[in-house]
Image (tube, rainbow, N blue to C red):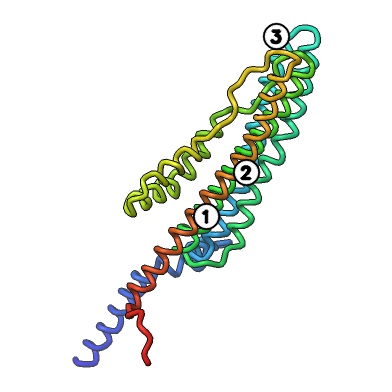
Amino acid sequence: MYFDFILKQYIMEKIINFILDFPQTVNQKLPKNCFNEMMDNSEGSVSDWTGKIFRVGALVVLVGMLLSVIKAGGDALNSAEGVGKLAAALCTVILIYAAFPIAQVVRSAGDSLAASKNSMVDFFFKDFIVANIKALGHITALAALFGAICSTVGWVLGSDGMSISAELYDSFSYSYALPVDAMAAFMGMLGLEFVGGFIADFFNWTVTGGEVSGYNLDSVVVLGWEFVQVVIILAQLYVALAFYHFFYGILSSLFNWIKSPYLPFKSS
């Protein structure tokens, strides 16, 4: 009687375990099933996946720019007359060329993120944000440079040149808004509001906007300022990066102190 009870309990336990383990058993038998391993290792592969996303983004940027430039170039050729057709053709070729280094900036950002070995916190709050600020800054500088080259070609040939969309400037401004606003607020806390105002003026500084009006000194100056604007964009980029590294260093030190608090005194 007791033996029957033990046997029934054993059989029941086997049945229950079989039912509960059934999903795992089937999962192990599925051919080419590497999805669970991918999910288990997903946290350690975040940097690699991020790099792949950026590489795909580089291809999307390249294709999108090529299609946009070719369409705009075709419209410019159809509407231009005389030497204007030559200017439109040259600017189209220049901007097609520009699409490749601009896309490479995105690809390079992805490669640097894929090679990161930092923890998730450092990867997201340092590597990822810094890579985005750098990429947008370099793309904006390249757009300004090739836009200036197209303006020069248009001026030399006595026709309007083509340029890359100015929306890139807005994207760059958005990317460095965090460190710039943080530094302005920090200066305000120290009673140095005039420094915060100077920082805001520096990041709003632009020397473009003049009109080319023929073969004269004023037109040369306007074109010269377009090339100077490239240098200003790069200067704004590196100042923004310096601000971000400054605040990230402070916050990192603060969090490390919270985890292991100590008094900053030396024992004699």
Q: Quick check: 78 left or right of 183?
A: right
On the image, numbered disc 3 is attached to which residue? Answer: 79
Q: Earlier in the sequence, mark 1 or mark 3?
A: 3
Q: Earlier in the sequence, mark 2 or mark 3?
A: 3
Q: Nearer the viewer, residue 208 or 95?
A: 208
Are circles 2 and 1 on residues that touch, CB within 8 Å? no
On the image, numbered disc 1 is attached to which residue? Answer: 242
Q: Quadrant of the C terminus?
A: bottom left
- Where is residue 219? Give x, y as percent: 70, 19
Q: Which mark is residue 43?
A: none
- Where is residue 35? Give x, y as percent: 51, 60
Measured Cα–Cα span from mark 1 to mark 3: 46 Å
Q: Quadrant of residue 61?
A: top right
Q: Nearer the viewer, mark 2 or mark 1?
A: 1
Question: Could you tell me if residue 247 is visible in this image?
Answer: yes
Within-10-Å neighbours for mark 2: few <14, some 14–19, many 20+:
many
Q: Amino acid at mark 1?
A: Ala
Q: Residue at x 72, y 25 (%)?
A: 150
Q: Secondary structure at mark 2?
A: helix
Above or below for 9 versus 218: below
Q: Amino acid at mark 2?
A: His
Above or below for 57 versus 63: below
| Outermost residue toward the top in this view | 81
Above or below for 197 versus 260: above
On the image, numbered disc 2 is attached to which residue? Answer: 138
Are circles 2 and 3 on residues that touch, CB within 8 Å? no
Q: Residue at x 62, y 43 (%)?
A: 138
- Where is residue 218? Give x, y as percent: 68, 19
